[in-house]
DNA sequence: AACCGCCGTAAAAATCGCGTCAAAATCGCC
DNA sequence: GGCGATTTTGACGCGATTTTTACGGCGGTT
């Protein structure tokens, strides 16, 4: 299943796009303003965004930047022939491709397929399950054995994500600190003790003898499922 | 599948590089700052890094050092003709190659292929197996015949790693001491007896008559699988 | 057979790293 | 500006690891 978000303030064009995409078996969300687009994207996490520049409430670039702040999902921009400058700015801001209006639906669909094909993020992010908790990387959600959500702070989540993505691998103190806190914190190994401890208290059945978030004394930590 | 990380603060150039690499079937991650680059590198463990010097937030050398702290992945540096001095520093810091801007995409791609060819093909499996244990260098994990993890201390691990990486070769006392303990410990040959003994007790089926961690009296030790 | 250099084992001593708790500082949101 | 949540910092006991010390065996040489 591929989920597309279409953003256009022209009701007629929007309708055409939605109908055509639904015919091609895409699951389609629609938005007519920049604000609505950002809200919908965050709610539905589409696999691709089709974005018309020149929305009433925000500049196209602002919308792209808003998306790029948290996702790498491909963005295909629609632009009128006169918006040459806007187009360049949009690409610099992080758009993946553009289509000049007027365009044929076939061309748009082809570019859409191409964008999805090369998107590295459309790779399935795994849901990792252990005997005491489950981590859904795509949904950014951890749940306990009964499926109840576990509340994690941003730092806790990021640390858990890095460990889970490298399942089975030893992650050195330096590597974890560099990834989660940044290069200036390489020596703050103490942060790790505090946060790993917090994760264990929230995730492990018996935080005193952890089964999945393991300490490798003097080296780092390792996640095993 | 080869994974590349491209780091450049110029959106136009970044985009050009990403598109060209994706066309060549690389899986590409992108970053515009040093901090983002280090985080992305640790999260995605690329097979090669293309790094523009002169990022806004960190010096190129700092980024290279940050990477070299935990990975040997090839780093190709992009530098303007005027950054002659920076270039030297970057190479000293551990970069593998450099390309002077402006450059042709063909040249960059050629150097990239060359770097990947030289590298001990990172996603290659550095897993060494013997009749009684297995060593996974990437995951930093040793397991017994039944796949159960064997707990090693940092010193034990580094010593084992050095021996395994030079499988079949005789490693002199001096070589081992210098690599694992540092240049000031060349004479502490006794450390080796203690730690090789510990490794044998943890890894060999019969520590009394070792099959894989062999003593070469008067000279050093040798690992054979 | 006694000596000597080298090796292996064991265990004590010294050092270092880890987990925990809780207070202080900071952040984010209203 | 105030409040709750989160991050950062500090202190301490405990356990793990490294270093040091001691002892015994093996093999070659005299």
Image (tube, coloured by chain):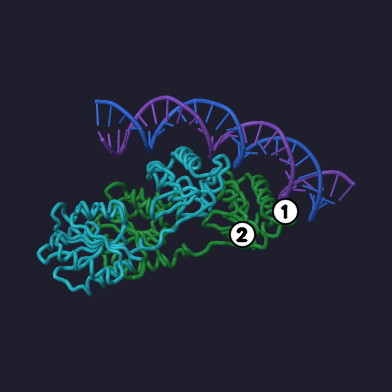
Chain colours: A cyan, B green, C purple, D blue
Taking the image as shown, residue B52 lies to the left or right of residue A84, namely right
Q: Residues at badges 2 and 1 in contact (C-beta under 8 Å)?
A: no
Quadrant for the N terminus of chain A, please: bottom left
Sequence-first tag of 2 and 1: 2
Which residue is tagged 1? Answer: B207
Q: Which residue sits at x=26%, y=69%?
A: A21
Taking the image as shown, residue B125 lies to the left or right of residue B6, namely right
The image quadrant that residue A117 belongs to is: bottom left
Which residue is tagged 2? Answer: B134
Q: Which residue sits at x=34%, y=54%?
A: B88
How dense is the environment of label 2, judged by Cα within 10 Å: few (below 14), some, or many (20 and up)? many
Residue B129: x %, y % from top left: 61, 62
Q: Is residue B85 visible?
A: no
User: Looking at the image, which is closer to me, A222 or A13?
Assistant: A13
Residue A62: x %, y % from top left: 19, 52
Secondary structure under tag 2 reads strand
Q: Which residue sits at x=42%, y=43%?
A: A151
Taking the image as shown, residue B18 lies to the left or right of residue A60, namely right
Residue B74: x %, y % from top left: 41, 60
Please, which residue is most extreme toward the left here?
A: A82
**Is residue A221 depicted above or below B82 in this figure?**
above
Quote the CA–CA distance across marks 2 and 1.
16 Å
Q: What is the number of callouts on the image?
A: 2
User: Looking at the image, which is closer to me, B50 or B218?
Assistant: B50
Residue A212: x %, y % from top left: 54, 48
Q: Is residue A225 visible?
A: yes
For discs 2 and 1, the disc positioned in front in the rendered view: 2
Chain of the residue on which disc 1 is drawn:
B
The image quadrant that residue A155 belongs to is: top left
Secondary structure under tag 1 reads loop
């Amino acid at each position: 299943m591929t989920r597309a978000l279409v953003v256009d303030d022209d009701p007629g064009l929007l309708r055409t796009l939605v109908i055509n995409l639904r015919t091609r078996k895409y699951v389609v969300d629609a938005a007519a303003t920049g604000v609505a687009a950002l809200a919908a994207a965050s709610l539905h996490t589409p696999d691709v965004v089709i974005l018309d520049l020149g929305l009433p409430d925000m500049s196209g670039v602002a919308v792209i930047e808003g998306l790029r702040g948290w996702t790498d999902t491909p963005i295909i921009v629609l632009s009128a022939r006169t918006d040459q400058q806007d187009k360049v700015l949009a690409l610099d801001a992080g758009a993946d491709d553009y289509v000049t209006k007027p365009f044929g639906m076939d061309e748009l669909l082809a570019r859409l397929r191409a964008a999805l094909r090369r998107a590295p993020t459309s790779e399935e992010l795994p849901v990792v399950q252990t005997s005491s908790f489950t981590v859904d990387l795509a949904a950014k959600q951890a749940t306990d054995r009964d499926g109840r959500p576990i509340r994690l702070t941003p730092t806790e989540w990021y640390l858990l994500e890095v460990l889970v993505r490298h399942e089975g691998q030893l992650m050195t103190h330096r590597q974890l600190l560099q990834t989660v806190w940044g290069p200036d914190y390489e020596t703050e190994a103490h942060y790790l003790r505090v946060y790993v401890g917090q994760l264990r208290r929230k995730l492990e059945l018996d935080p005193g003898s952890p089964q999945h978030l393991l300490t490798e004394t003097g080296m780092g930590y390792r996640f095993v499922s």
